């Protein structure tokens, strides 16, 4: 079956003598520029002036550390869901209540596309996207972040963790009360019980 292409009507692309001089386009561009001159400037003198980003920004993925230890339970979901296969991990057993921990946890920052899927799938909120965006590598080996380089204390990630709690449950604090002691199955819930929390609104 032949595809019929409708031709443009004659004279559609023909410019008038005024349009051929391109004065309307030049004047409109100059008018926009003059209008912006007297408005507030949004230019940031980077890197002299640091850019402050909100908690919704997805920067370098990091591991959440509590009391010097990673919160990760080595379930492997982040490594499985990662589209460019940037995460590599190996699990090992431990005497802690969480029973498992990542003996090896590496993220290849050259492969990472900062999609945030690892953060979304993590049941323990052990890996989150940090506000860090300014980092460089001098070699391919330096771009592979090990567990020691990925660990960041929870207090430094509080804005992101609070934003995640709000975004994952927009009705948080409005519709229901959840007793943590009814369903203590995660390290996060156990730590909240130890801190004295009984109900989450």
Image (tube, rainbow, N blue to C red):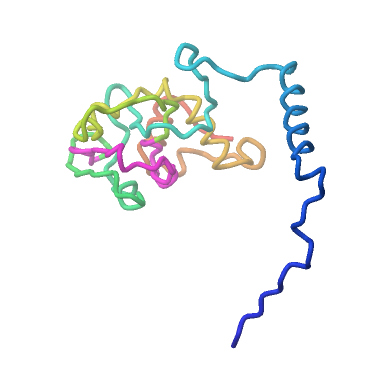
Query: Residue 6 location in percent, x, y?
Result: 71, 74
Query: Residue 36 location in percent, x, y?
Result: 72, 22
- Residue positioned 27% across, 43% down in the render: 74
- Residue positioned 38% across, 30% down in the render: 191
Left or right of 23? Residue 187 is: left
Query: Residue 82 location in percent, x, y?
Result: 35, 49
Identify which residue, 94 or 146, lies in the foreground. Answer: 146
The furthest residue to the bottom: 1
> Where is residue 44, by image quadrant?
top right
Q: Quadrant of the C terminus?
A: top right
Identify which residue, 4 or 142, lies in the foreground. Answer: 4
- Residue positioned 51% across, 19% down in the render: 51
Query: Residue 10 location in percent, x, y?
Result: 78, 66
Is residue 184 rendered magenta in the image?
A: no
> Where is residue 189, by image quadrant?
top left
The furthest residue to the top: 48
Q: Which residues are magenta?
A: 99-127
Q: Quadrant of the N terminus?
A: bottom right
Left or right of 88? Residue 191 is: right
Left or right of 180? Residue 23 is: right
Vertically, is 30 above or below 47? below
Vertically, is 131 above or below 18? above
Q: How many callouts does the rendering have?
A: 0
Is residue 103 rendered magenta in the image?
A: yes
Identify which residue, 139 or 71, lies in the foreground. Answer: 139
- Residue positioned 46% across, 11% down in the render: 48
Identify which residue, 105 or 16, lies in the foreground. Answer: 16
């Amino acid at each position: 079956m032949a595809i019929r292409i409708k031709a443009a009507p004659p004279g559609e692309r023909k410019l008038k003598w005024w349009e051929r001089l391109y004065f309307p386009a030049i004047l409109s561009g100059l008018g926009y520029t003059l209008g912006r001159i007297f408005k507030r400037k949004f230019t940031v003198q980077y890197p002299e002036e640091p850019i402050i980003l909100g908690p919704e920004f997805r920067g370098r993925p990091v591991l959440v550390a509590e009391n010097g230890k990673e919160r990760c339970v080595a379930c492997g979901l982040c490594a499985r869901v990662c589209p460019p296969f940037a995460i590599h991990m190996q699990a090992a057993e431990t005497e802690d209540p969480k029973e498992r921990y990542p003996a090896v946890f590496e993220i290849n920052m050259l492969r990472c596309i900062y999609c945030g899927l690892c953060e979304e799938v993590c049941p323990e909120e052990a890996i989150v996207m940090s506000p860090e965006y300014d980092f460089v590598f001098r070699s391919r080996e330096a771009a592979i972040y090990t567990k020691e380089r990925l660990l960041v204390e929870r207090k430094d990630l509080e804005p992101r963790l609070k934003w995640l709690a709000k975004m994952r449950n927009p009705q948080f604090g409005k519709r229901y009360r959840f007793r943590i002691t009814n369903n203590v199955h995660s390290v996060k819930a156990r730590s909240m019980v130890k801190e004295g929390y009984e109900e989450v609104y």
